[in-house]
Image (cartoon, grey):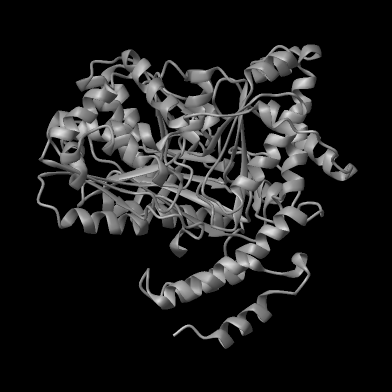
Amino acid sequence: MANPEEMKMLATEYIRTGDHSHSDYFGLIKKLVSLRNRYERGSQEFKTWQKEIDRIYDLVRDELINNQAKPTTPVKFGTSGWRGIIGKDLTVKSVSQVTQAIVALYHGVESNPELANGLGVKTLEEARTRGCVVGFDNRFGGELLAQAVCDVLTDSSIIVHYAGESTTGVISAALLEIGAAFSINLTPSHNPLEYGGYKFNGSDGGPASDLITNRITQDAREIIDLGKELFLSPDQSLVREFDSLGSWIDMVRRNQVHHALDYDSIMKQFAGDEEIVLAVDCVHGASRLHINRLIRDNSSETSNDRMLVLRGESDPTFGGVAPEPSSTNMKPVMHVLSKRSEPLKLGAVIDPDGDRVRLTDGKVEIDMNLFGAMAYHFLHEHKGLHGMVAKTVATSNFANKLAEDFGEEVFESRVGFKEFKPVIGKALVCFEESDGISLIGHTPEKDAYIGLLLGLDMVMTLRKNLGDYLLEIQKEHGYYFPAKDGVVVGSQGKELMSALSQLEKYSEGSIIKVGDEERTITKLIDIDGRKMVLDDGSWLMVRPSGTEPKVRFYVEARDKEKQLALFETAKGMLAEIGLLK
């Protein structure tokens, strides 16, 4: 049974009464979640622990509203915006200040052509009239922080198109469909439950360029350092709620001519196809609000028992799991599919803000390294589309081989979806190894829904499960076995970059030992870390983390048994330059 004395002792350990700054609310919440999870959902014990979790979240709410201190870590907009701890970094005050910095950008566009070009807006009045799409994921306090954003925007007479809780891909599509000037999405994507985040997209619907994010970072820090009290006169009449998912569906329908995905036909086929079952794990994220309407409500009653939703309840703790597409989170989906009799099976795990997706057929887990290449093959060979493929440098070379065999180009970029900007509208598929994908004619943001729709079309069109289709492609074009890992090191930032510069001795023509074999580096890519392609088509890549004292390894073997040897080679290189002992 839940023990009141145990609850009181835990609270004393983690909380300093009346002192938000020295209270570890999320440390306590994580502990309470682990205790809650010992019991069945719906049981009295579960409800008792949940009541205590709700009580602690009330303290977080108070901190969000009343914390007037600077963020514990300075604001920094990176590849996917600003991320920090809810209540400590992201508060009503700090989010308002960052929004002020963004509004200031639009005040300066008329006198700064470079800024105007980066934002896609020529005047402040244009930004006011076109407005901003505002949304958030399922993180605790999302609605509070969104209201803070709306107050700052409407104080400056900027129209707000209010999406409420929604996903990154949907918000991006909505921005493009209604012609908004920009969007603000309060999400840290797949980060743990204690994190909040702030994403800014310009008028193109995609992640902002370094020019823009650097300005936001600089201006936000200046505003925060000045610490002026905010005196706002928000105009609620400028806030207009709208159907963001409806905008997404409209965009997919309108751009069928580009990506060849017929949304209505796919839904109609799913409704009548008794040979296929679909299982989607929302991991309690924002997709739980969309998935039934996206698939089930657009099909028929008869398909309801073939559309299965896992972890579709509201829960900002994510049930205590890391909220990301992963092998661990894929297990429930695979278990559910294993019990189904339908010959065609498709499963998916979607992260909290719906910008990442990983798929399965119940037997084979297919991450984006492989699915991105399969998507390219399907669009090129079965939909009759022609064009390049775009991928980040850390992603499998499977797609490179397909493009070579098709006589098409490959665009290989640094890590980060915004790096695809030069080929948006040209590349049939843009994808990254961390389960993000978009298609030609869709948004420049990664989007789990378009990946899911494509997977569904793929299975029903080919009458094959994904694992069988993958095997078919591999038999013709070759086998690729990507994997990744990482190690903690004793340095970061400039010190780490300086140490890693010693790896420059490994250049084209260098011979390295991989297991018992000697391999020659035939190609070197150094646009983001150091990727060394070897003479058997395998490769290894060493890349520093931008936020942690950590080095990440990405490898790809042509024989699965040789993956471990590639990892050992990468670690040996770090040991040689003194980063590993």
Q: Position of residue 338 (x, y in %)?
A: 17, 56
Q: Residue at x 89, y 42 (%)?
A: 228
Q: Nearer the viewer, residue 509 or 95?
A: 95
Q: Quadrant of the rendered structure where residue 575 is?
A: bottom right
With respect to residue 417, does 330 lie above or below?
below
Q: Nearer the viewer, residue 375 or 238?
A: 238
The N terminus lies in which quarter of the figure? Answer: bottom left
Q: Position of residue 446 (x, y in %)?
A: 45, 33
Q: Position of residue 81 (x, y in %)?
A: 62, 39
Q: Quadrant of the rendered structure where residue 431 is?
A: top left
Q: Nearer the viewer, residue 215 or 508?
A: 215
Q: Residue at x 24, y 26 (%)?
A: 378
Q: Position of residue 292 (x, y in %)?
A: 32, 41
Q: Is residue 72 visible?
A: no
The C terminus lies in which quarter of the figure? Answer: bottom right
With respect to residue 205, does 8 lie above or below?
below
Q: Please, which residue is most extreme toward the front here?
A: 237
Count of numbered tags: 0
